[in-house]
Image (tube, helix red, strand yellow):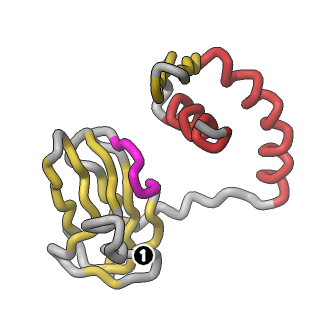
Amino acid sequence: MNFENIEKLAEILDKYNLSEIDYTESDAFSITLKGAVAAPVQAMAAPVAQAASAAAPVVNSDEGLHIVTSELVGTFYASASPDSAAYIKVGDEVTVDSTLCIVEAMKVMNEIKSEVNGTVVEILVDNGTPVEYGQAIIKIKPS
């Protein structure tokens, strides 16, 4: 376990508003992260985030976009296998029934298909990330 992996666990803890994560890699390594521990880190980062937001105003650009959501709880995969190219990337044109990604649930690979024709604007989840039912995963600008 390295520091980057611990940071990823902390991000999952924060992203899904969990109170605690227990992780055991082997008999030799075990870690527990609690939500209350992450709060001071966020508090220290707040002035930096406020300064950044003051420099660049945030604009709600989701208006008119089609938001693709996860149809089930599972793991998001951008491609069919680790050696395969991603199904989509930002800027790609997609059509109705184009495969966008896979969500694995209980060892079953479920293809998520586009419901609209359009351009991929943003992919909201990283490859291999857990997703929840109804979670926004991809933004598409309909054509």
Residue at mark 1: 89
Decide which of 33, 135 is in the foreground and name it: 33
Rendering quarter of residue 59: bottom right
Q: Residue at x 67, y 18 (%)?
A: 37
Q: Position of residue 1 (x, y in %)?
A: 58, 36
* Position above or below: 10 against 64: above
Above or below for 47 versus 52: above
Report whether 143 appears left or right of 54: left
User: Does residue 129 show up magenta in the picture?
Assistant: yes
Q: Name the residue rendered at 44%, 54% in the picture.
A: 125
Q: Residue 71, percent across and down?
A: 21, 48
Using the rendered view, name the quadrant where residue 43 is placed. top right
* Element on which disc 1 rests: loop
Is residue 139 found inside the magenta-colored segment of the image? no
Name which residue type carries label 1: Lys
Question: Which quarter of the figure has residue 135?
Answer: top left
Where does the image place residue 27, in percent across and percent down from the top left? Answer: 47, 20
Span of residues in magenta: 125-131
Q: Main secondary structure of the magenta part?
A: loop
Residue 36 to residue 78: above or below = above
